[in-house]
Image: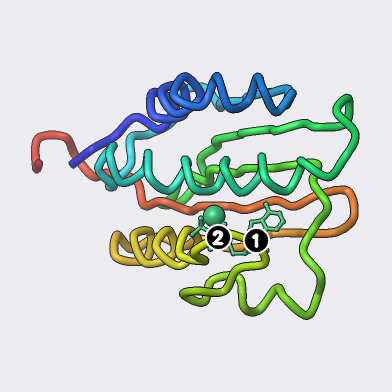
Amino acid sequence: MLTRVEDVVRLVLRLLQHDLQISEVSVATEFQDNLPDVHLDATQLQQVLLNLIKNAIDAMSSVAREARRLRLTASFDGHASVLLSVEDSGRGIPVKERERIFDPFFTTKTGGMGLGLAICFTVVANHGGKLRLVKSDSDGSIFEVAIPVGGQHSAE
Ligand SMILES: Nc1ncnc2c1ncn2[C@@H]1O[C@H](COP(=O)(O)OP(=O)(O)OP(=O)(O)O)[C@@H](O)[C@H]1O
Ligand SMILES: [Mg+2]
């Protein structure tokens, strides 16, 4: 199944429009021209993005309203993957916790299940992709999803 990353990003931003507005998060997007389609069905990519953006919104609840920025970018790595990054200006993830964030049931939130990242990680890995934390410090965090691009359309 081939999916246009840009379409999914726009759809998820629409779904979360209200949450983003009440949380006073400003959003910026940047898509490289002529991005290849990826091998991950749209619903699954939607789930992954929803989880990452919800985490970003949560992480920014503790910073000043005017400093809440979400940035989404998509680019081709030049080889075989589209890189989709989700950057927030939240409180960051303490070093001690970084190695546990992808573990099922690891959460620092009251009422959190701790399943969001674990599920995203598995979904992406099952499609030959990778989900990783690129950076995290007191200025915020960046998560990146690398998703394999599709082959010839005719082979689908
Ligand atoms: N963008 C982020 N900024 C800061 N901390 C984060 C971010 N994303 C995840 N975390 C940390 O990783 C933990 C695990 O995230 P995960 O999405 O798996 O679970 P959750 O958000 O706590 O609960 P759930 O997603 O099941 O509702 C979070 O509780 C939080 O401590
Ligand atoms: Mg979560």
Residue at figure coordinates x 75%, y 59% from the top left = 135
Residue at figure coordinates x 55%, y 60% from the top left = 112
Mark 2: amino acid: Gly
Q: Is mark 2 on a helix, strand or loop?
A: loop
Q: Residue 150 carries which label?
A: none
- Quarter of the picture holding the N terminus: top left
Q: In this view, does 125 lie to the left or right of 153?
A: right
Question: Badge 1 is on which residue?
Answer: 109
Question: Would you place residue 98 above or below residue 26 in this image?
Answer: below
Can you give x and y, in whole percent of width and height, for residue 24 in the image?
74, 23
Q: Can you tell me whether the CB of the residue at mark 1 lies under 8 Å from the nearest atom of ligand 1? A: yes
Q: In what quadrant does ligand 1 lie?
A: bottom right
Mark 1: amino acid: Lys
Q: Cβ–Cβ below 8 Å for labels 1 and 2?
A: yes
Residue at figure coordinates x 77%, y 41% from the top left = 61
Q: Can you tell me whether the CB of the residue at mark 2 lies under 8 Å from the nearest atom of ligand 1? A: yes
Can you give x and y, in whole percent of width and height, for residue 28 in the image?
68, 23
Question: Would you place residue 10 above or below residue 69 in this image?
Answer: above
